[in-house]
């Protein structure tokens, strides 16, 4: 890490100035129009300790190589579109500070694993969303349309509140070794979103979702490695949610 704190002539750096430094990003590149396989390219950018990896990627794209491709939208950890592997771990580029990923060495940036790479850091998310849609991620009720709000106690809400935080970034699913090797596995994110409705006291389709997840490629494929919980940028206890779904399948109590 090379410090670059400019000073005015004859004096010290202004108070409060944040030193800048040069950091190297080693990015996996793949262009299906010209490449037969992925390769790595290195870029150097001038950054501050408070900069995020997304800021460095923007600097590369806007100032050095406009062909670099990656997804991003809100840039505030809400949309989940910029999930990628940073130094071997699934993270959101917009929430990962450069100073937290050892800028003294090249920072390796790769696409998330287990999904087909379309170009550079962009993967095909359709297999992920196919599994998400299959678990019926919406409220199901019977009878007539209600004339007033469906009330719920705080205790009932707390039962599934953690899994409402999911932003569908796929960081948990693509950190799962089972998902890497088995393209049919639903994956943690789909199970988390099923959990959100299975344990919602207002919903009436828990049995249907449990049967969907009782498939051989469903919840029983989880090997409890905790990769998913560690990867979740929202802090969801993913492994715990999966275990609760397994328990509900065995006891039919939800």
Image (cartoon, rainbow, N blue to C red):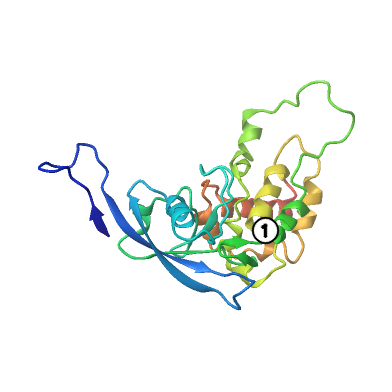
Residue 254 visible, this angle: no
Where residue 250 sits, quadrant-wise, is bottom right
Name the foreground residue: 80 vs 214: 80
* Residue 27 position in % (x across, y down): 47, 66
Name the foreground residue: 144 vs 30: 30
Q: Is residue 125 above or below residue 76?
A: below
- Looking at the rendering, in which quadrant would you find the N terminus? bottom left
Name the foreground residue: 130 vs 116: 116
* Residue 81 position in % (x across, y down): 59, 50
Q: In percent of the image, x 51 and y 56: which residue is there? A: 231
Single out the residue that lies furthest toward the right.
144
Single out the residue that lies furthest toward the left.
10
Q: Which residue does the numbered mark 1 point to in the structure image?
A: 125
Q: Is residue 207 above or below residue 149?
A: below
Q: In percent of the image, x 59 and y 75: which residue is there? A: 35
* Residue 229 position in % (x across, y down): 53, 54
Q: Circle 1: is it few (<14), some (14-19), or many (20+) Cα within 10 Å?
A: some
Residue 172 visible, this angle: yes
Left or right, 11 with reference to 99: left
Q: Is residue 99 above or below residue 106?
A: above
Count of number-bearing discs: 1
Left or right, 80 with reference to 22: right
Where residue 145 sits, quadrant-wise, is top right
Where residue 213 sits, quadrant-wise, is bottom right
* Residue at disc 1, secondary structure: loop
- Looking at the rendering, in which quadrant would you find the C terminus? top right
Single out the residue that lies furthest toward the top.
148
Left or right, 242 with reference to 15: right
């Amino acid at each position: 890490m090379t410090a670059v704190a400019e000073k005015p002539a004859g004096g010290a750096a202004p108070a409060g100035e944040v030193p800048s430094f040069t950091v190297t990003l080693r990015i996996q590149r793949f262009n299906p129009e010209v490449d037969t396989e992925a390769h790595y390219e290195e870029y150097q950018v001038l950054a501050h300790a408070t900069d995020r990896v997304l800021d460095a990627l923007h600097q590369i794209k806007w100032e050095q190589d406009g062909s670099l491709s990656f997804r991003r939208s809100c840039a505030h950890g809400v949309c989940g579109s910029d999930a990628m592997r940073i130094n071997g771990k699934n993270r959101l580029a917009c929430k990962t500070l450069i100073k937290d990923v050892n800028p003294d060495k090249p920072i390796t940036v790769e696409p998330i694993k287990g999904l087909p790479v379309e170009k550079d850091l962009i993967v095909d998310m359709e297999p992920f969303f196919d599994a998400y849609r299959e678990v019926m991620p919406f409220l199901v009720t019977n009878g007539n349309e209600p004339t007033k709000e469906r009330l719920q106690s705080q205790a009932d809400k707390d039962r599934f509140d953690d899994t409402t935080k999911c932003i569908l970034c796929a960081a948990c699913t693509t950190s799962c070794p089972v998902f890497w090797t088995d393209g049919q596995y639903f994956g943690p994110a789909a199970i988390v979103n099923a959990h959100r409705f299975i344990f919602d006291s207002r919903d009436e389709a828990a049995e249907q979702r449990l049967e969907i997840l009782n498939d051989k490629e469903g919840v029983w494929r989880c090997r409890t490695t905790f990769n998913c919980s560690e990867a979740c940028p929202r802090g969801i206890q993913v492994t715990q949610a999966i275990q609760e779904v397994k328990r509900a399948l065995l006891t039919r109590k939800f």
